[in-house]
Image: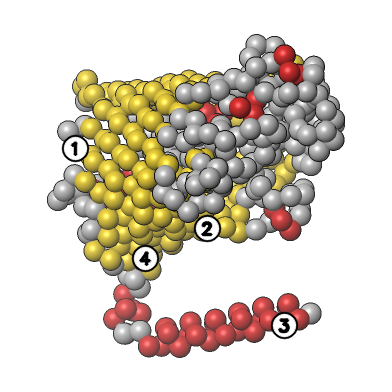
Amino acid sequence: MQYSYAMRNILSHCLLISCVLLQTLPASAQESKSIVGINSELTYKMLEPNQNVRKVNILINERHAGRLETKKLIIGTSLIAIADFQHSNTDSRFAYLMRHPTSTNQIGTEVSEAVIHSFQFSVYGAINPWIATFAEMLYNPEQSFGTGTITAIGRNQIQLYRGFVVLGNLDKFPIYGAIGKMDAPFGLMNSVSPFTNSTMWHAFSGLGYGAQIGFKKYNIEATFMAVQGGSQFRAMNTIVGDSTNVPSQLNNFTADLNYTLHFASEVELKIGASYLRGSVYNQDFPVIHFKAGVMNNPASTVYSEFLLHRRLLIIAAFAKTAYAWPGTYNPSPPLNIYPASKVSSLVAGAKYTFNPESKIAYTISAEFSNYIAGPDGSPWERQNQYILGFCGLINKSSKFFIEVFGTQGYVPLNFISGSNPNDPFPEGTTHCSNSATSLGVVVGAQIVF
């Protein structure tokens, strides 16, 4: 009761303040309605979760192309709703990573759902041709790290997923910078699938606090990001101080360099490589999300994209850690026969767009990606993912899709090689399985305003 009363008070005061502020605006601002606007194409590019991942680059490129106004606030929303069905050959072992693959979420050998996968709200603004800002709020119960099921309070939270200030104007100068919470410029984390992230993305896509500096000219794009130490939000972790996880130093970084070759009109090939000083694969046994590392384990990647007449897109990438991941060795028999292993991932895929300039652009796609975390024969050896997709993109800003997917292996990162005795698994056991397979289908839509 007290909570409801307080919320009503807050909402009523906010409404009153908004009305007062509106009355104090100059008449020209109220009449022109040009201060706040909607740009659905921009919002789609910035909020689309698996095909346009480097958001700082997208924003600076959109400004360079002259598609964004200054002194105007752009607001946008994106909602993804899905229905899916999955079948597994092993009880409660569903490796599809678009929802957390644990028994908290999926019980038995057949599961189904009809849910909101995620909702996003974004704000973009530029005060002049050199300074812009972007912020994104995210609600994602399916992939939230909160405890419980998708109806638990801990997994029904809203967070600032990305937020950064961009400084630069490619029309005047080829160097730009950004500070905030953003995606790491590491490798090719994009997917050709309409909805599903690649296993490469799950394995190596970084998100963290830091500062970027970039260069773009002569078909060359180079980016360096200094990253806050400790375990960041995704895929990055370095030792801070005396082997702690307190992010009190800016001691991690990633660097990327790519070059685009233009063979003919609308035929191009991008090739690139990246380096990350501290990947997430640096923890000792037992492995737990966001636990402090015991070493710095770098990772490197090479990647390529081929685009033909804006219709055919082919991607390929490979990434691998420099050293073995200590936590992949379980000291308890019988699992102690498997040595610690380096971590690697690859992705290869293609999609074809039949009518890229139509009001509804249809695409078909096929993609394979994997995650290798253990030696041959180990329960956590690998997890493969196959995706066949069909999509209709409406006005370059909303889409409906259907995907058929399959997985081989079941390898969640948390407690990947087992745990301490009965915490949560018995000694010498793991929940991973290299023989588990699953098949499924997902249909859904992403509606953007």
Q: Mark 1 vs mark 4: give the one in front.
A: 1
- Residue 44 at least partly seen: no
Name the disc covering residue 236, or none: none
- The picture places residue 429, in percent across and down from the top left corner, at 80, 25
Query: Spatial distance from mark 2 to mark 3, Cα to Cα?
Result: 26 Å
In the image shown, does 360 or 28 lie closer to the viewer?
28
Gap in Å between the C-alphas at discs 3 and 4?
32 Å
Identify the mark at residue 160; answer none if there is no mark: 2
- The residue that disc 1 covers is 217
Residue 257 in picture, x, y percent from top left = 30, 31
Which SS class for mark 3? helix
Residue 156 x, y percent position in the rendering = 68, 56
Q: Using the image, determine if residue 148 lies above or below residue 391.
A: below
Which callout, 4 or 2, points at the residue further toward the start of the chain?
A: 4
Under circle 2, the secondary element is strand
- In the image, taking residue 361 as reference, residue 96 lies left or right, namely right
Q: Secondary structure at mark 4?
A: strand
Sequence-first disc among 3 and 4: 3
Front in this rendered view, residue 321 or 106 = 321
Label 1, label 4: how far apart the Cα atoms are? 28 Å
Residue behind mark 3: 5
C-alpha span from label 1 to label 2:
32 Å
Give the residue type at disc 1.
Answer: Lys
Mark 4–mark 2 distance (CA, rounded to whole Å): 18 Å
- Quarter of the image where one finds residue 260: top left
Amino acid at circle 3: Tyr
Q: Earlier in the sequence, mark 2 or mark 3?
A: 3
Left or right of 429 on screen, residue 256: left
> Image height check: is 431 above or below 16?
above
Q: Residues within 10 Å of mark 4 (few under 14, many from 20)?
A: some
Of labels 1 and 3, earlier in sequence is: 3
Q: Amino acid at mark 4?
A: Leu
